[in-house]
Image (cartoon, helix red, strand yellow):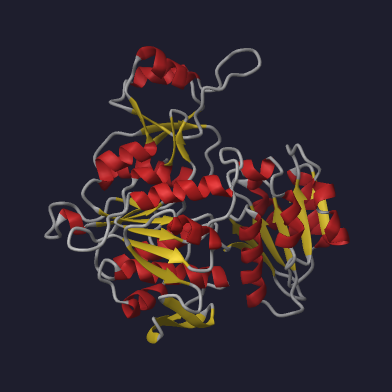
Amino acid sequence: MGGLAALAREAGHQVTGCDAGVYPPMSDQLRALGIDLIEGFGADQLALKPDIFVIGNVVSRAHFPDGTPKFPLMEAILDAGARYTSGPQWLAEHVLQGRHVLAVAGTHGKTTTTSMLAWVLEQAKLQPGFLVGGVPLNFEVSARLGSSPSTSVPASGMPFVIEADEYDTAFFDKRSKFVHYRPRTAVLNNLEFDHADIFDNLAAIERQFHHLIRTVPGTGPHGSGRVVVNDLEESLTRVLAQGCWSEVRSFGSAVSDFTAVGEPHDFEVLERGHSVAQVRWELTGVHNQLNALAAIAAAQHVGVAPAVAAQALGSFRNVRRRMEVRGLVRRENGDITVYDDFAHHPTAIRTTLDGLRRRLRPQQRILAVFEPRSNTMKLGTMKAQLPWSLEDADLAFCHAGGLDWNAEEALAPMGAKARVAHSIDELVNQVVASARGGDHILCMSNGGFGGIHLKLLEALQK
């Protein structure tokens, strides 16, 4: 929603927004754009009399036990008959119409891969528009309109790269967000069970991905759509089996159209067995290697050669809150490094830890500090996978405040390697008591995590 606000502001609209507890980097970005933030969802905001209210999917018709609405502004909008729409619907009607949309979908890696693809197109002089669920360091903004219709580029060729989320659109539109985007290029990066608060099982999510495929143009003289799919995912094989009318380009497996040979930080790209590019960059982890292949295959669909794409990736700087170093604390026996990462699903935690482990020497320790904050993790749906996800950590520290399930019990298979705290202060004390020179402290959450990064850095310096 912050990215949508930025696009509307760039398009010349006056934009005001409200939310509860907005935190950096988005809060800083919005203020820099001159977008006023109002704390809370008070009905008095109806007096702003905007042309339209754009409703995010955090908003619901929920009421507190005493009968008062959780979102009074929404109730006022409905009572007044004011004009409203969803974020994805507004985007489809006012930004994406007539453009070549490249949509990046998947359980993991959407933000990073979308950022990679936008940067590749930028370096190829295509001036893409983009909307990313984070802040790419190469751009320092999460969204922009890109090429305008006044340029010499025909509207149908103006690329717009978008992070395509399968979560539902709004309380009044339960379709996945990505069905609104009508991509000409669709990336299916991976697919696992997630969002247990709205999906009953993996098959239900696969069906939504099939609905996305239904919106991609076909092939032949009357169509030019492309689906880029991860060959390693059985779930995506099932999605394509439900029906696909577009050109398919695969990546990841030994028999895919696009494959990688070498380590994740320095690898050769093969297209159907022929060497076409070399990627050398600062990123680590097999997951980022796969993200790169997806971006290269998608960029090719708008005329960017793999060699050009690979060269652009060499200067890709990742995204805020993706293995972002928040600070160093000097110690005689080695610096302690504190990182911030958005990982919250067990698979994302495991791949993030694997990527860091590959960069370190065997004697260097990883202290994993995390909170099960997403709706899926709060429900405890994947608590049994946590010990598996944390295998590469030397010590793991879990913030269990607000959970309805027993974190100590879930982490018991890890024995003394796992600690549980029920407040941020207690968690900080546990980590500081265990840390020693040379350690790498990786904080993982899809929220602000109570500002734990700065609290750790301050406590470690005492």
Q: Quadrant of residue 180?
A: top left
Residue 388 placed where, x, y %? 74, 61
Res 462 seen here: no
What residue is at 32 percent from the left and 37 percent from the top?
90
In this picture, is 20 found above or below 291? Answer: above
What residue is at 68 percent from the left and 47 percent from the top?
372
**In this image, 337 relative to 1: left or right?**
right
**In this image, 136 relative to 449: left or right?**
left
In this picture, is 388 found above or below 33? Answer: below
In this picture, is 372 found above or below 103? Answer: above
Residue 46 placed where, x, y %? 38, 18
Quadrant in which the C terminus is drawn: bottom right
- For the residue pair 383 and 71, the one nearer the viewer reads as 383
What residue is at 56 percent from the left and 35 percent from the top?
21
Residue 34 placed where, x, y %? 35, 40
- For the residue pair 406 and 416, the one nearer the viewer reads as 406
Q: Quadrant of residue 81?
A: top left
Residue extending farthest right: 416
Total tally of numbered discs in the picture:
0
- For the residue pair 53 and 178, the one nearer the viewer reads as 178
What residue is at 70 percent from the left and 80 percent from the top?
361
Residue 27 placed where, x, y %? 47, 43
Quadrant in which the N terminus is drawn: top left
- For the residue pair 262 and 23, the one nearer the viewer reads as 262
In this picture, is 425 found above or below 155? Answer: above
Res 104 seen here: yes
